[in-house]
Amino acid sequence: MKKIVTLTANPALDIYSTVEKVEPEVKMRSESPKKDPGGGGINISRVLHRLDQENKAIYTSGGFTGDIFAQLLDEEHINHEPFAVKNDMRQNFGVFENSTGELYRFGFPGAEMEESEAAGLLDKLEENLEDAEFLVASGSLPPGISTDFYGRVAKLAQKKNVKFILDSSGKALAEGLKHGAYLVKPNLDELQDLTGQKAETAEQRKEMLKKILEDYPVEVVVHSLGPDGAFLATKKEIKHFPAPKVKINSSIGAGDSMVAGIVYSLANNKSLEEAVLFGLACGSATLISPGTELLKKEDVERLYKQLLDNHKDA
């Protein structure tokens, strides 16, 4: 198996609970909270582990939340190496409203991180890239560090001859792509931010995907379309892949699961088309899981077989 390293610069301790009804100025009685280690790269590592794919998670950690976070990763038997920072790790909160089936998600920005800490995180990352073939950087950046952080990660991946996969947003994503990536997975908002254009039709989205491939040193763009599946764009062609029809229980971690499925497939010598189909299966398997549960391997295998069969018949 090819070695995969994930990077999470701004992880979060995810707290999830349920209430009967969300109401203002009322003390709402909620269920006992569930705690999970979260953040883009961390979720990807957790999904890869569930797929029996070896990988290592590099992330920032500080304070009592960082201690809880590490303990939770240990309980899941995740191979992880934290980089200590002085401020507490952030927390995110999600609450499911039983009466309506609505999910409310509250994401906090995270504590300030110093540029010296960012440099130390890059040094730790470099130490862990020996013999790696894929580096997946995912999630937001903490306040205080330069938006070119993912650009520095991209240059480090080039130096180590590692395939770089980036999943972020805003200026952090744009600055990272200036220095190149093997694969990037933007949603619609991120696609529009990167191109400065609006998309109302599939054809407009395709033109924007072409523009990204022209404007940035990127080999592959996987554009997620939610329940409508995904576009796979290379300089050679753009292809659409439908997603399986599933009943959505929670969207938490679905995008990260899709990225995990893609890199898992690529690390196991699958084609790009197979990787996108497997990524869709992973994302959908997380959608049917409650709260912050992420996917179950048996759900992935069932959905992937369904997608493969449909793709062959198409």
Image (spheres, rainbow, N blue to C red):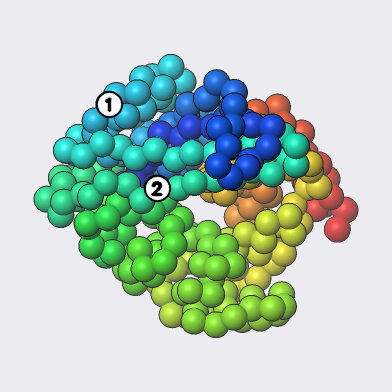
Number of numbered discs present? 2
Amino acid type, residue under disc 2 in the picture: Phe
Give the residue at mark 2: 108
Disc 1 to disc 2, C-alpha distance: 17 Å
Q: Is residue 238 above or below residue 308?
A: below
Asked if residue 217 can be seen in this view, the reply is yes
Which x, y percent locates residue 244? 78, 47
Q: Residue 3 is drawn in which quadrant?
A: top left
Judge left or right: residue 36 versus residue 276.
left
Which x, y percent locates residue 257? 57, 42
Mark sitting earlier along the chain (1/2): 1
Q: Residue at x 24, y 30 (%)?
A: 63
Judge left or right: residue 117 versus residue 141.
left
Location of the C terminus (image quadrant): bottom right
Residue 138 vs residue 251, the one in the foreground: 251
Q: Residue furthest left?
A: 116
Amino acid type, residue under disc 1 in the picture: Phe
* Secondary structure beneath label 2: loop
Judge left or right: residue 192 versus residue 160.
right
Which x, y percent locates residue 194? 47, 74
Q: Residue 300 is drawn in which quadrant?
A: top right
Q: Is residue 227 above or below residue 297?
A: below
Structural crowding at the residue carrying mark 2, measured as other residues with C-alpha within 10 Å and reported as few (<14), some (14–19) or many (≥20): few
Q: Residue at x 48, y 32 (%)?
A: 15
Which x, y percent locates residue 46? 49, 32
Give the residue at mark 1: 64
Q: Residue at x 59, y 80 (%)?
A: 198
Q: Residue at x 53, y 63 (%)?
A: 186
